């Protein structure tokens, strides 16, 4: 039996500290640390997940017949697809929700993740948006005035029924662009860079039949290939880790260098390093940092000696929440046990390659002759497990006849030497050779 004091205490209301979210947080803060390009990619991801729900039935080309069109200028941005539209029931309960609900009807193997991509993209790009959907259950339109919505009490968006259409798809048009976005979308350089990154990061969807266009230009197919010959074969490893299928490939995309030039072409450098792909979406491309293995836990940092090497690690999961990526899909979770276990295997296969690059210095000419290109194999065709294979280089106790010399000097001093030599167009490498030969002649009399 309780005392009167206990009864009185139980009847008192709980004391509250308010934790209501603010709309301004969603409009400004969640858009601050994401690039415009990655917001556009979030919209592409939504369209691709729509296509997953209605595959073509062709095993090799499940995205055949699906198309995503991007059009933009300094006044507006639009993305339109024919991938099935948003179900009205999903729009009411899930698609416009801030954050992914536990009972959200995710598509198996999808790339939509946290339930913030579409809203974040809209807020990042502009102040007015119209989302139009034609799905098999309904056709509807949602109009969002961001500034009005921010000051209104309810969080909900209004929708209206529109005339039905047999063309199943979604159209998102954004106007009253934010100032910085207006500058970027009106810049032809941004368009070209966007197409280049779409071609690379969505290459595996394009290979499977998806068509993506920017304006009137079709995004080209970007092929990831590794070299294979009698003496050089790429490594392939496959395993499963707690419901995630992992596939690791590594090999050569170009000739290994026989010396290290001062200037490296960015177009080439962007092809080398480790690529991380989650459910066919490239998350990290040509990484040469400790975001993958380079310099991680005392592992070797990237060196130009490794130019020509490319590694690929694929993570596939029906439940995309098991994958080790972040909300921007441009970074990996370094604390993910799944990712850490993959990194261990990536280091093992890379060490085989690095050991070879050190051995080949003993007889560079023999190595180059043995590395003569055979064929380039699309990495999607490398399905059977196999180990790295490289030419056998006999390492003797005798010192090699040739050695590379590398050092850095002030560019003004180098330019002065070029002018003194009467050839301002000569390379830094040739300046080094000339100064070395001058020392041998003057100081050693040779």
Image (cartoon, rainbow, N blue to C red):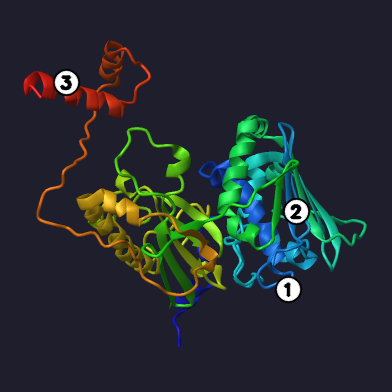
User: Which residue is the site of mark 2?
Assistant: 157
Depth check: give the residue in front, 397 or 59.
397
**Mark 1: few/some/many CA within 10 Å (<14, 14-19, 20+):** few
Residue 203: in sight, yes or no?
Answer: yes
Q: Position of residue 205 (x, y in %)?
A: 63, 60
Do callouts 1 and 2 mark residues in contact (Cβ within 8 Å)?
no
Q: Position of residue 278 (x, y in %)?
A: 52, 63
Residue 375 appears left or right of 197:
left
Q: Taking 97 as reference, is 312 left or right? A: left
Q: Is 369 placed above or below 341 here? A: above
Q: Residues within 10 Å of mark 3 (few under 14, many from 20)?
A: some
Callout 2–callout 3 Cβ contact below 8 Å? no
- The secondary element bearing badge 1 is classed as loop
Residue 380: name its quadrant. bottom right
List the single residue furthest toward the left: 444
Residue at figure coordinates x 29%, y 62% from the top left: 352
Residue wearing tag 3: 438
Query: Who is closer to the viewer here, 412 or 35?
Result: 412
**In the rendering, at what x and y percent does residue 225 appear?**
50, 57
Quadrant including the N terminus: bottom left
Q: Which residue is mark 1?
A: 57
Position of 157 compared to 365: left or right? right
Q: Residues within 10 Å of mark 2 (few under 14, many from 20)?
A: few
Which residue appears at 63% of the width and 57% of the height? 98
């Amino acid at each position: 039996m309780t005392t009167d004091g206990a009864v009185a205490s139980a009847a008192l209301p709980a004391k509250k500290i308010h934790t209501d979210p603010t709309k301004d947080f969603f409009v400004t803060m969640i858009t601050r640390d994401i690039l415009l390009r990655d917001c556009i990619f979030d919209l592409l991801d939504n369209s691709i997940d729509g296509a997953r729900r209605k595959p073509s039935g062709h095993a090799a080309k499940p995205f055949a017949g699906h198309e995503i069109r991007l059009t933009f200028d300094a006044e507006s941005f639009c993305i339109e697809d024919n991938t099935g539209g948003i179900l009205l029931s999903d729009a009411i309960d899930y698609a416009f929700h801030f954050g992914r609900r536990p009972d959200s009807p995710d598509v198996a193997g999808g790339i939509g993740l946290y339930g913030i991509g579409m809203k974040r993209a809209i807020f990042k790009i502009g102040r007015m948006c119209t989302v139009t959907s034609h799905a098999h259950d309904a056709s509807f339109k949602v109009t969002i005035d961001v500034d009005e919505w921010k000051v209104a009490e309810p969080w909900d968006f209004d929708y209206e029924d529109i005339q039905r259409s047999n063309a199943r798809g979604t159209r998102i048009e954004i106007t009253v662009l934010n100032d910085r976005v207006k500058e970027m979308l009106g810049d032809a350089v941004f368009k070209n860079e966007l197409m280049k990154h779409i071609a690379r990061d969505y290459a595996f969807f394009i290979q499977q039949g998806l068509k993506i266009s920017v304006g009137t230009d079709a995004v080209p197919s970007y092929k990831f290939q590794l070299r294979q010959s009698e003496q050089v074969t790429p490594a392939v490893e496959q395993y499963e880790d707690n419901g995630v299928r992992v596939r690791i490939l590594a090999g050569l995309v170009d000739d290994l260098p026989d010396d290290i030039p001062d200037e490296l072409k960015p177009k080439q450098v962007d092809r080398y390093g480790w690529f991380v792909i989650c459910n066919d979406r490239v998350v990290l491309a040509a990484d040469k940092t400790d975001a993958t293995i380079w310099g991680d836990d005392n592992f070797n940092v990237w060196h130009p000696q490794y130019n020509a090497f490319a590694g690929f690690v694929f993570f596939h999961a029906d439940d995309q929440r098991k994958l080790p990526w972040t909300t921007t899909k441009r970074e990996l979770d370094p604390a993910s046990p799944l990712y850490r276990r993959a990194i261990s295997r990536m280091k093992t296969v890379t060490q085989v390659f690095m050991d070879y690059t050190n051995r080949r210095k003993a007889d560079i000419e023999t190595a180059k002759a043995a590395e003569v290109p055979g064929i380039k194999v699309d990495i999607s065709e490398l399905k059977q497990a196999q180990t790295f294979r490289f030419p056998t280089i006999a390492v003797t106790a005798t010192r090699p006849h040739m050695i590379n010399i590398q050092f850095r000097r002030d560019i003004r001093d180098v330019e002065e030497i070029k002018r003194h030599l009467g050839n301002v167009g000569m390379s830094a490498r040739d300046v080094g050779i000339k100064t070395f030969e001058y020392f041998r002649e003057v100081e050693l009399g040779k």
